[in-house]
Amino acid sequence: ITGRASKCASVHVGQIQPGGLRGNHRHHTCNETFIIWGADTKFRLESPNVKDKGYAEVTIRYDEVALATSPSGTAHAIINVDRVRSTFLLGCQDILMKNNASTTDYNVWKDL
């Protein structure tokens, strides 16, 4: 899978409540891989090849499990669009990250 984490130097597990968001940032120094399940969820990935929007977006249904990647330098966001269920995720980065590091751009998309 292109852009995947080459190893799991940093692993995180999360839950996103209905209507919640995780991500909306861009890491410049690591690749990231996600497993996403549990609720109707949108995964947004920055893509200059998508005219007008600049990103691709897929919806993962509550009864599906998705494997998604975000290559270094690519913005990503995980949005729970379910009214009832929580989204769960397992994320893996191929380097240890510092959350306040200057190597991450935050609040990439203003519509989220």
Image: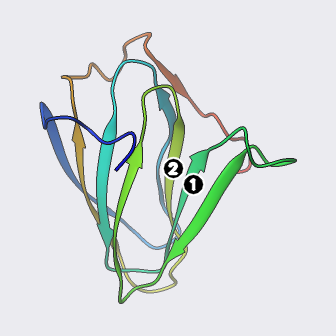
Picture layout, residue 75 above or below residue 102: below
Mark 2 Cα-neighbour bin, 10 Å: few <14, some 14–19, many ≥20: many
Picture layout, residue 17 above or below residue 12: below
Mark 1 Cα-neighbour bin, 10 Å: few <14, some 14–19, many ≥20: many
Q: Please state the horizontal and vertical placement of residue 72, each as a whole percent of the image.
A: 43, 28
For the residue pair 1 and 74, the one nearer the viewer reads as: 1
Mark sitting on residue 59: none
Q: Earlier in the sequence, mark 1 or mark 2?
A: 1
Q: Residue at x 73, y 43 (%)?
A: 49
Q: Amino acid at mark 2?
A: Ala
View extreme (top): residue: 102
Q: Please state the horizontal and vertical placement of residue 106, each as a whole percent of the image.
A: 54, 28
Tag 1's secondary structure?
strand
Identify the residue position indicated by label 2 in the image. 77
Q: Please state the horizontal and vertical placement of residue 56, each as a whole percent of the image.
A: 65, 55
View extreme (right): residue: 52
Label 1 to label 2: alpha-carbon separation? 5 Å
Q: Amino acid at mark 1?
A: Arg
Q: Residue at x 37, y 13 (%)?
A: 101
Picture layout, residue 89 above or below residue 4: below
Direction from residue 54 to residue 3 in the image, left or right: left
Tag 2's secondary structure?
strand
Q: Determine whether label 1 and label 2 are within 8 Å by CB.
A: yes
Q: Please state the horizontal and vertical placement of residue 28, each as a whole percent of the image.
A: 45, 19
Identify the residue position indicated by label 1 in the image. 44
Q: Residue at x 51, y 34 (%)?
A: 25
Picture layout, residue 85 above or below residue 46: below
